[in-house]
Image (cartoon, grey):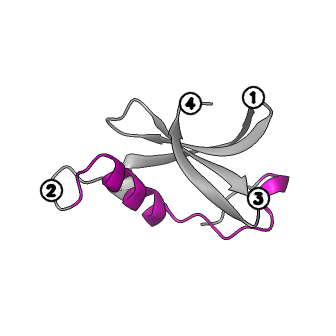
Amino acid sequence: MDLPYGTKFENIPDIEVDTLIEYFNLEFGVAGSSDVFKESDFKYLGVFIKEGMEAMYWSVNNCKVHAVVRPFEDSYIIEMGDGP
């Protein structure tokens, strides 16, 4: 995914929407059901600094939380959180 990464994201692997889909399907326990998340459910919002930490944010259809990706060492952590 060609995103406008901030400086902390320069040396980590690209974040693929498929990774977010897998994470959300596992967390919500919908894998294999008709309620699975799809690529069209995720909308990239950008890189924001919240509480002094840089993170990428995606809104998620039909979900009160956002997909949040934070840099960690030479990789990243995916989590759910409030919007930017």
Q: Distance between the Cα atoms at labels 2 and 1?
A: 36 Å
Say if 8 sits above or below 45 in the image.
below
As displayed, is residue 1 above or below residue 67? below
Part of the protein shown in magenta: 6-31
Question: Which mark is on residue 9?
Answer: 3
Q: Which residue is mark 4?
A: 83
Q: CA distance from mark 2 to mark 4?
A: 27 Å
Label 2 element class = loop
Q: Which residue is mark 1?
A: 51
Which mark identifies residue 21?
A: none
Relative image position of residue 68 (x, y in whole percent)? 57, 44
User: Who comes first in sequence, dot 4 or dot 1?
Assistant: 1
Q: Residues within 10 Å of mark 1 (few under 14, many from 20)?
A: few
Cα–Cα span, label 1 and label 3: 17 Å
**Image quadrant in which the N terminus is located:** bottom right
- Disc 2 and disc 4 in contact, CB within 8 angstroms: no
Is label 4 in a helix, a strand or a loop?
Answer: loop
In the picture of the structure, the residue carrying the numbered disc 2 is 33
Q: Local crowd at mark 3 within 10 Å, few (<14), some, or many (≥20)?
A: many
Which circle's residue, 3 or 4, is located before the other in the chain? 3
In this picture, is 21 found above or below 13?
Answer: above
Percent position of residue 56, x then y: 65, 47
Residue drawn 64% across the image and 68% down it: 14
Query: Which amino acid, by three-letter code, is at mark 2?
Result: Ser
Q: Are marks 3 and 4 in contact (CB under 8 Å)?
A: no
Gap in angstroms between the C-alphas marked 4 and 1 = 12 Å
